[in-house]
Amino acid sequence: MRKRRPFISISSKLIFIFSCIIIVPVTVMSINSYVSSQRLLERKYTDLLLDIAKQSNIRISEYLKEIEKITLVSSYGMNRYSSLVYQEEYPIQDFLHYSNDESENITYRVLMNYILMKDRLFSIYIYSLNGGRDMFVHSTEPIDYSYRPLQEPWFREFLASDRKVVILDPQVDKQIRNKNKYAVLHARKVFDMSNGRLLGVMVASIDINFIGLFTNRLQEGLRTNFTIVDQHNRIIYHANSQLIGRSFQDIMPFRDEKGITQAWGEDYLVVRSPFEELPWTTYLYTPLSEISAEGAILKQNMFILAGLILVFASFTSIFLSTVIARPIKKLMRNITLVEKGLFDNLPVIDSNDEIGELSRRFNRMSSELKQLVSRIQKEEKEKAMAEIRALQSQINPHFLYNTLGSVKWIASMQKADKIVEMTEALISILRYTAKLESSMVTLREEIDNIRNYIIIQNVRYYNRIQLQIQVDDSLLDNRMPKLILQPIVENAIFHGFAELEDEGIITVRAHRYDEGIQIEISDNGAGIDPATAEWLNRELRSAENIQTSGIGLPNVQRRIQLHYGDRYGIGFHSAQGQGTTFVITLPDIQD
């Protein structure tokens, strides 16, 4: 015995439906809006970090170019700061030539003026290669006079090369006593202006903290995470000087231009911007949680709005369900009274909608039912005879067509185009089915019949079924048994499209082959699982054992083989989730 399903009231169903109709879109929209906003925020923040990194690179490069110009002008340019009593135009040249006190004092004042112009962020060291004195101009740190870079590998390599200028990666400035000072060294060869002989080397030691001039306006988090690496990906600048010299990959495993990576158990947004003229690269990174903090406000507002909408939706759904379900409950009580035999004086449901009309008709029906029950014993024999006569009679097709024609006319007068279309299709199907002249029809008539069938089914499936006919006109007059296409189309709709959410497409193709024609009916439905496919194959192979009163697929197979023999019939191929194609093989017979 089939187990009775538990009772669920209409009010509960309406509340559930209304809640789903409101909750699902609101939830989807809220989540989608938050995710989209978060991605947009990350993209905008990434572009901002890239722009900051690029601008910082430009300003750092410009600062180094200015230092380069200072070394060039001071080595070979006019001296605007020399004493009036000393009229030589090239004090550094003179100092390297003569190394006397007067030229040393003038050169020192000139270079100190340049240093003061740049906020004392760099020092200048002049190393004589002419046997004279060296000069060290530093405004803040004590000089280590015991150090000379002549044995340094970079110095010897520079002297041996043809280059006139070299910029070294940040390193400890060994010329001062404070060995914790990192500096960018800019070295320039100084040649004799008269004969081109190498006189010495000028080194501008630029305090690495000059980069702070360009990062001090950044937020604290960005300023502490501003990193510059060399061509070997070693850190040459970081707010934490202890990281200088380490590989950037050790602290932040990242190589792309921009993106998100994980470090120290947290996600970071990282951007990368190489210098144009220097073999350096700037990395700027910030915790993703700081960006998400801005999106948290938006998330909170969205949740508040969604919560208010859901509360409103809950009250609305309860109110609407109560209004709709109240008269239905009254009608149910009336039905219960009728079941108990109380046909008179039923409570009236005062409603001007379909429920009220249904209640009034039910009350009239209950009154008539009372009269019928009172006469049932007297009219039992007459009723039995009437039933026998009714079972023996048949519906007059002409009367049925006229009745459907009247329905069509009324629908047309009321401009119910869908009903008109459906009625026309139904009339055509009934006429086609009831046609007694012959059991053989043309392919054209079969196609017209399934067109009418699809029209009726689209009313049920909200126009989700599309029929495509790809048949050459030369095959439309081929003859075949009646009603062999419609059962296959029906099978595609009720089994292939039962759980399909997208549009269902049924395609009918026909073509000739050596011994006849083949008609293919394909759908994009759910397909047939292997077990069902095996069962259907057995049914089609054993079609000769079935009765011929139905119109199922085995019956179609049987009728085709009765007409033309076992060489013809139905075959199919299907893959679950990829649709099904039925192939009907018939002889090539035309009018």
Image (cartoon, grey):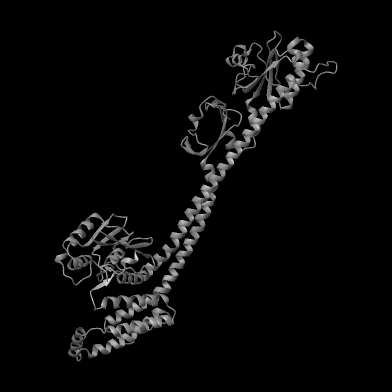
The N terminus lies in quadrant? bottom left
Along the viewing direction, whichever of 63 and 173 lies nearer the viewer: 63
30 or 370: which is nearer to us?
30
Residue 347 seen in the current view: no
Q: Is residue 246 left or right of residue 516?
A: right
Residue in the foreground of this view, choosing between 433 and 269 = 433
Of all residues, the one furthest to the left in this rendering is 545
* 323 vs 154: above or below: below
Q: How many marks?
A: 0
- From the top left corner, tell me how far across and down residue 234 is, in percent: 53, 26
The picture quadrant where one finds residue 153 is top right
Is residue 529 visible from the viewing direction of this image?
yes
The quarter of the picture where residue 533 lies is: bottom left
Q: Of all residues shown, which one is farthest toward the right?
A: 85
In this picture, residue 354 sits left or right of residue 33: left
The structure residue drawn at horizontal position 45% and vertical position 56%, both measured from the top left corner, is 28
Is the C terminus in the top left, top right, bottom left or bottom right quadrant? bottom left
Q: Say whether residue 503 is left or right of residue 442.
A: right
Q: Extreme top residue here?
A: 131
Tell me where residue 23 appears, x and y as whole percent.
Answer: 44, 60
Q: Percent from the top left, x then y, of residue 198?
A: 69, 13
136 or 443, nearer to the observer: 443
